[in-house]
Image (cartoon, rainbow, N blue to C red):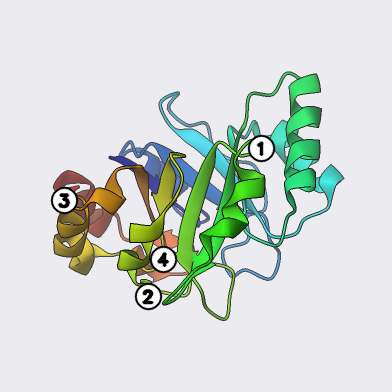
Amino acid sequence: MKLKICGMKLNTTEVAQLRPDYLGFIFWEPSSRFFKGETPELPHTISKVGVFVDAEFDYIIDMVSKHQLQGLQLHGHESPEYCTKIATELKKLNHKVDIIKVFSIKDEFDFDVLKPYENVCHYFLFDTKGKLPGGNGYTFNWSVLKNYPSTKPFFLSGGIGLNNLNKINEFMKTPESKYCYAIDVNSSFEIEPGLKNIEELQKFKEAL
């Protein structure tokens, strides 16, 4: 199981020492975890993911180049055509970048909306539907994923913390976990927005 730690801002270097598989940097200005400045040098085993919400095309391309992003997490209402346009441009620029399209779930979800994205995204990410696009601090009903119709690997996100370890273990025994590729954590491991609790993250990673 891969681990993505999102909302990097104040202690990225320390978090990177835990060797997660992905670190997420939020490039959406209204977020309290909005990332400015230079991303620190990371071990080559860690993929840098930029998180965007309905961002301008040129802004995304600029951020990929500036920060050498290896993943794009699209958290807004980005269309399949928009995702294709980004992928095409990045290919022209010889940037190898995975596109992760986010869908928010509460108690139910129409999985038909995934179909147009099947051929334009590398991964899906399922997050909790709330007031904000991410960082709402609580989990959605994972049993909804019993109806997952795809074979595309997905990230499981939304308020996941140390208290969810048993729930994750139970989930991983179910058929709906077959394509669960990574666990994505953020706000449940924070001392304040963008400042991660290293000790708790280490416990979680070891248990995972």
Find disc 2 in the rendering and name its residue: 138
* Residue type beneath disc 2: Tyr
Q: Which mark is residue 120?
A: 1
* Mark 2 and mark 1: Cα distance apart in space: 29 Å
Which label's residue is closer to the chain start, 4 or 2? 2
* Residue type beneath disc 3: Lys
Find disc 3 in the rendering and name its residue: 173
Disc 2 and disc 1 in contact, CB within 8 angstroms:
no
207 is higher (above) or lower (below) than 99 = below
Find disc 4 in the rendering and name its residue: 158
Relative horizontal placement of residue 169, taking residue 116 as reference (left or right): left
* Mark 1 and mark 3: Cα distance apart in space: 29 Å
Bin the neighbour count of mark 3 within 10 Å (Cα to Cα): few under 14, some 14-19, many 20 and up.
few
* Mark 4 and mark 2: Cα distance apart in space: 6 Å
- Using the image as rendered, state which of residue 130 and residue 192 is in the foreground: 130
Residue ID at (32%, 65%): 142
Q: Horizontal and vertical percent for residue 28?
A: 68, 61
* Residue type beneath disc 4: Gly
Eye-nearest disc, 3 or 4: 3
Which label's residue is closer to the chain start, 2 or 3? 2
Which label's residue is closer to the chain start, 1 or 3? 1
